[in-house]
Image (cartoon, grey):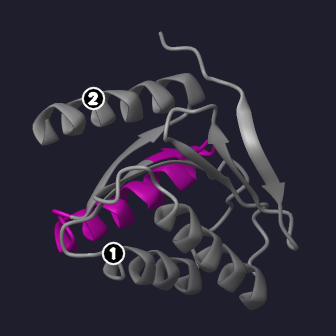
């Protein structure tokens, strides 16, 4: 099992959302608080766009989504996810390792991410996890696959 590197360049934003990088791996972390106020969701959308823009590989974004505090999948959250993925460049892919703890949320997120993946197959790759080390290891594997393909 992979070990999870220390978070660096960590920032806590206005509504408590944390963004950070896993050491110098090129993998980012995104940890919202679960606040669903419209302004908090808009802030999260912009933070995700910023993280994607800062990726070292402009064609691939690798993010661990810490959704352990997520208790619902509101229409606003679904639309935000759709906006983020649809705003990716045509040759850009978001690799999302989604961490959840609540079994109901795992089921809801599974249905939603399957739909999102079908709609944006080339731009959205994901896996659901309950363990951060497994999520991080999957993203490292994805990075390795894509760096070999590019090389």
How far is mark 1 from mark 2, CA to CA?
Answer: 21 Å
Q: Earlier in the sequence, mark 1 or mark 2?
A: 1
Label disc, if present, on residue 88 of the rendered structure: 1
The residue that label 2 is drawn on is: 144
Left or right of 147 in this view: 13: right
Q: Residue at point 57% right, 86% down?
A: 76
Can the viewer see residue 90 in this picture? Answer: yes
Q: Are marks 1 and 2 in contact (CB under 8 Å)?
A: no
Mark 2 Cα shell of 10 Å, populated few (<14), some (14-19), many (≥20): few
Q: What stretch is highlighted in magenta?
A: 97-122
> Is 146 above or below relative to 11?
above
Label disc, if present, on residue 130 of the rendered structure: none
> Is 47 above or below relative to 104?
below
Q: Position of residue 63 (x, y in %)?
A: 50, 49
Judged from this view, the residue extending furthest toward the top is 1
Report which quarter residue 148 is drawn in. Answer: top left
Left or right of 60 in this view: 135: right
């Amino acid at each position: 099992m992979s070990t999870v590197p220390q978070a660096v360049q960590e920032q806590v934003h206005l509504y408590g959302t944390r963004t950070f990088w896993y050491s110098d791996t090129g993998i980012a972390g995104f940890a919202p608080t679960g606040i669903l106020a419209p302004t908090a969701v808009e802030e999260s959308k912009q933070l995700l766009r910023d993280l994607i823009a800062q990726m070292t590989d402009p064609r691939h974004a690798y993010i661990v989504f810490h959704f352990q505090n997520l208790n619902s999948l509101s229409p606003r959250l679904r639309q935000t996810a759709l906006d983020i993925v649809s705003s990716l460049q045509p040759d850009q892919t978001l690799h999302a390792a989604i961490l959840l703890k609540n079994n109901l949320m795992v089921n809801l997120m599974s249905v939603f991410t399957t739909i999102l993946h079908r709609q944006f197959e080339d731009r959205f790759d994901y896996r659901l996890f309950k363990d951060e080390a497994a999520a991080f290891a999957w993203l490292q594997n994805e990075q390795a696959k894509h760096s070999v393909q590019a090389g």
